[in-house]
């Protein structure tokens, strides 16, 4: 099926949508993105994603080409046009196309490029992987130092995924100065003695929108949360582990570098948080 996508103010069939070869997203990875999930044909955590998008652009001195209400309307129109019940909306904004390749930013009046498309993913809420849990390896974190900005420079996370695949695993947790930063495309957690432990917010990690919601729900459910760095050894010795992201929600992690975590099966905290997150998010989806 040909998708309807959105490019610079127009809804087009995917095979007619184009951007310039001079686009700075293409030449310099000079762009930011967001991924918002869709459940029951509605957007999950849209406001959080819109706020983080504005922040990412602000940190890079990029002009925001679209008001949040209009962005919401584009998301909704793409959900409608493509009949998405469960899936994802990918949004990317770049600093646009200058007349030539130049490291210096183009003039302020260069229009940013904005692209959105849908990914149809029936069954994401009922993912079989959430029932078995996933396996991860640890790798050195070799990304740049502003991971709080959600840029499209995702080559190292892609390399990390390939390293995980080569090791027969599903994902990689990245490690810096002996402590886990985050997964290639998710925030990482362990549970020890009933306490949920996840790295504190800083420039070292992306401030996950799902992370914020899950920690809020955990605290509301009287679960103890500690925001601090943890090591691979601590994770291997924990009772359970999981990760969060907009596309996978809460996903149990059952093995790290070949060592089973806890019983080697999804733990009760991850299972419960996944249920709470899905239930509560559906209630307020827009
Ligand atoms: N960390 C990284 C590096 C990510 O790429 C993502 C997902 N894009 C996350 C964390 C999770 O963020 P969110 O919950 O907002 O999807």
Image (cartoon, helix red, strand yellow):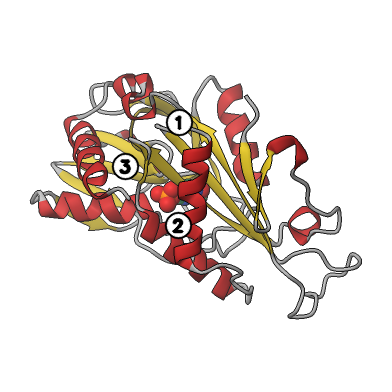
Figure quadrant of residue 22? bottom right
Would the CB of label 3 be found within 8 Å of ligand 1?
Answer: no
Q: Which of marks 2 and 3 is in front?
A: 2
- Considering every residue shown, the one lying at the far bottom of the view is 108
Answer above or below: position of 253 versus 76: above
Residue beneath the point at 65% across and 29% down: 2
- Residue lying at 50% horizontally and 63% vertically, measured from the top left: 70
- Front position in the image: 124 or 6: 6
From the viewer's perspective, tell me whether residue 105 is left or right of residue 58: right
Count of marks placed on residues: 3
Instruction: Determine crowd level at label 2: few under 14, some 14-19, many 20+ residues with C-alpha closer than 10 A.
Output: some
Q: Dot 2 corresponds to which residue?
A: 72
Between marks 2 and 1, how big is the CA–CA gap? Answer: 35 Å
Name the mark on residue 136.
1
Which residue lies under the disc numbered 3? 234
Mark 1 and mark 3 lie on one chain; the one further toward the N terminus is: 1
Query: Is residue 146 among the parts visible in the rendering?
Result: yes
Nearer to us: label 1 or label 3: 1
Residue at 81% over, 75% down: 104
Query: On the rendered structure, is 90 left or right of 221?
Result: right
């Amino acid at each position: 099926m040909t998708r309807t996508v959105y490019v610079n103010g127009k809804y087009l069939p995917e095979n007619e949508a184009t951007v310039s070869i001079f686009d700075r997203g293409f030449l310099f990875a000079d762009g930011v993105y967001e991924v918002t999930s869709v459940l029951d044909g509605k957007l999950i955590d849209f406001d959080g994603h819109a706020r983080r998008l504005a922040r990412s652009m602000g940190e890079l001195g990029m002009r925001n080409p679209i008001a949040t209400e209009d962005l919401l309307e584009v998301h909704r129109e793409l959900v409608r046009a493509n009949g998405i019940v469960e899936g994802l909306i990918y949004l990317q904004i770049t600093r646009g196309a200058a007349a030539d390749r130049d490291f210096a930013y183009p003039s302020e009046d260069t229009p940013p490029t904005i692209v959105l498309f849908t990914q149809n993913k029936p069954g994401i809420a009922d993912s079989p992987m959430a029932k078995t849990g996933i396996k991860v390896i640890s790798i050195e974190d070799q990304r740049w130092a502003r991971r709080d900005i959600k840029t499209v420079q995702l080559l190292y996370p892609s390399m990390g995924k390939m390293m995980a695949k080569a090791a027969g695993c599903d994902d990689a947790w990245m490690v810096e100065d002996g402590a886990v930063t985050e997964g290639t495309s998710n925030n990482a957690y362990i549970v020890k003695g009933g306490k949920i432990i996840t790295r504190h917010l800083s420039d070292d990690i992306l401030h996950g929108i799902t992370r914020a919601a899950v920690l809020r729900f955990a605290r509301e459910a009287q679960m103890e949360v500690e925001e601090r760095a943890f090591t691979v050894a601590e994770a291997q010795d924990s009772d359970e582990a999981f990760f969060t992201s907009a596309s996978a929600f809460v996903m149990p992690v059952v093995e790290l570098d070949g060592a089973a975590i806890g019983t080697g099966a999804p733990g009760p905290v991850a299972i419960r948080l996944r249920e709470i997150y899905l239930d509560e998010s559906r209630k307020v989806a827009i």
